[in-house]
Image (tube, rainbow, N blue to C red):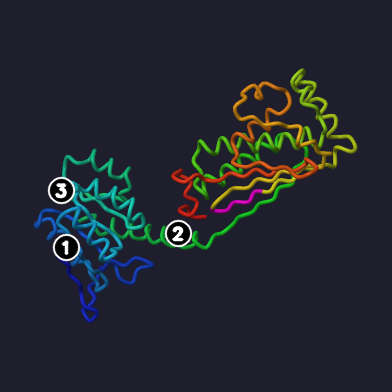
């Protein structure tokens, strides 16, 4: 293992590496070739204004040991090395040290492997022929981005809950708008994968439609099954009539690390919850005019509950262990 460090009393040099958020920067250089290690070390020392500590490792295996011991801010690694190569090191770093970025140093002819390494988690790459011209600027850009991610992670650690409330008129065009807003929020800020977003969207759409058409407007499912055009015409007529026109749908979204909770309440008379049997093994429920929406909701959600009156439904979705729903790893 090799390392170099400029003492605190050393005279700062011009053109040093300065990145907001870092008073001192620890860099690990990984390369099996002594000449290339010396080249990279020389470039870094030329730009050292007294704030850099540089460590060297000759293999991917040694690099992981030094990462555990020295906690570097960034890793510069060769791609082709005996034993654990740069690609394998990037994969291991992404798994064990996701907030320490890796920059690849690639020789000619390694572009395809470098592209794969970028997909596996490398932050950037610099061709070895361009190290003198591009290494410093690449290092500064990646460190700045990494600092932003670390601050975002610390901020996310402070987050406990987000709650949003919506009050909807009996206008079906609002349902898609609300569902789309919820899906965008859960994807962007809480990292819910797309396949789960679709299922959550279907469940929420069904709950809002039930509240709007069957709850507030008191329309029967049989009418929709027999004549959808007449069903929507009657819905439009009732939107202008007492006592339906002043009724609204209240929707609350509560997002926590361990669950997403949807509550939908209407101003209708409710229904007998006990009359709605749910058998997840009975696909025929999908063909019945009444209960199809509730069947989908119960299938897609982890927990479904009604209030005693039957005019409020609470739907709970819980991220599964091992899923990509890393709520605490996505900045809000």
Mark whose residue sits in front, 1 or 2: 2
Q: Position of residue 232 (x, y in %)?
A: 77, 26
Disc 1 and disc 2 in contact, CB within 8 angstroms: no
Residue placed furthest toward the top: 226
Pick whichever of labels 3 and 2 is earlier in the sequence: 3
Mark whose residue sits in front, 1 or 3: 3
Residue placed furthest toward the bottom: 9
Pick whichever of labels 1 and 3 is earlier in the sequence: 1
Q: Which residues are magenta?
A: 253-257
Q: Is residue 142 above or below residue 17?
A: above
Q: Which residue is mark 3?
A: 81
Q: Position of residue 307 (x, y in %)?
A: 75, 45
CA neighbours of label 3 inside 10 A, class few (<14), some (14 to 19), many (20+): some
Pick whichever of labels 1 and 2 is earlier in the sequence: 1
CA neighbours of label 2 inside 10 A, class few (<14), some (14 to 19), many (20+): some
* Residue occupying the point 64% across, 35% down: 297
In the displayed structure, does residue 284 sit left or right of residue 195? right
Q: Which residue is mark 2?
A: 153
* Residue occupying the point 30% across, 49% down: 122
Q: Which mark is residue 41?
A: 1
Q: Is residue 275 above or below residue 329?
A: above
The front one of 166 and 256 is 256
**Distance between the alpha carbons at the discs numbered 1 and 2:** 31 Å
């Amino acid at each position: 293992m090799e390392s170099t460090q400029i003492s605190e009393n050393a005279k700062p040099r011009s053109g040093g590496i300065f990145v907001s958020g870092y008073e001192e920067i620890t860099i690990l250089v990984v390369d099996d070739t002594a000449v290339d290690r010396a080249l990279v070390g020389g470039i870094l020392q030329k730009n050292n204004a007294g704030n850099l500590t540089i460590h060297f490792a000759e293999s991917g295996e040694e690099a992981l040991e030094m990462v555990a011991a020295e906690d570097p801010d960034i890793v510069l690694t060769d791609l082709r090395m005996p034993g654990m190569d740069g690609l394998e090191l990037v994969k291991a770093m992404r798994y064990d040290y996701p907030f320490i970025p890796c920059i690849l140093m690639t020789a000619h002819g390694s572009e395809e492997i470098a592209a794969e390494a970028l997909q596996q988690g490398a932050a950037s790459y610099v061709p070895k022929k361009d190290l003198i011209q591009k290494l410093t600027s690449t290092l500064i850009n990646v460190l700045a981005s990494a600092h932003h991610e670390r601050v975002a992670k610390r901020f996310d650690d402070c987050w406990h809950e987000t709650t949003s409330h919506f009050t909807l008129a009996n206008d079906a065009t609002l349902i898609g708008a609300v569902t789309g807003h919820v899906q965008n929020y859960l994807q962007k800020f809480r990292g819910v994968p797309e396949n789960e977003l679709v299922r959550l969207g279907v469940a929420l759409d069904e709950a809002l439609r039930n509240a709007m058409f069957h709850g507030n407007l008191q329309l029967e499912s049989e009418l929709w099954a027999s004549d959808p055009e007449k069903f929507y015409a009657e819905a439009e007529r009732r939107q202008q009539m007492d006592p339906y026109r002043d009724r609204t749908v209240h929707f609350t979204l509560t997002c926590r690390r361990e669950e997403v909770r949807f509550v939908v309440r209407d101003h209708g008379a409710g229904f007998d919850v006990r009359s709605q049997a749910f058998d997840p093994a009975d696909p025929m429920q999908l063909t019945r005019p009444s209960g199809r929406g509730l069947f989908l909701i119960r299938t897609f959600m982890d927990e479904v509950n009604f209030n005693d009156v039957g005019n409020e439904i609470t739907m709970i979705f819980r991220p599964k262990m091992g899923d990509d729903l890393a709520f605490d790893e996505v900045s809000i």
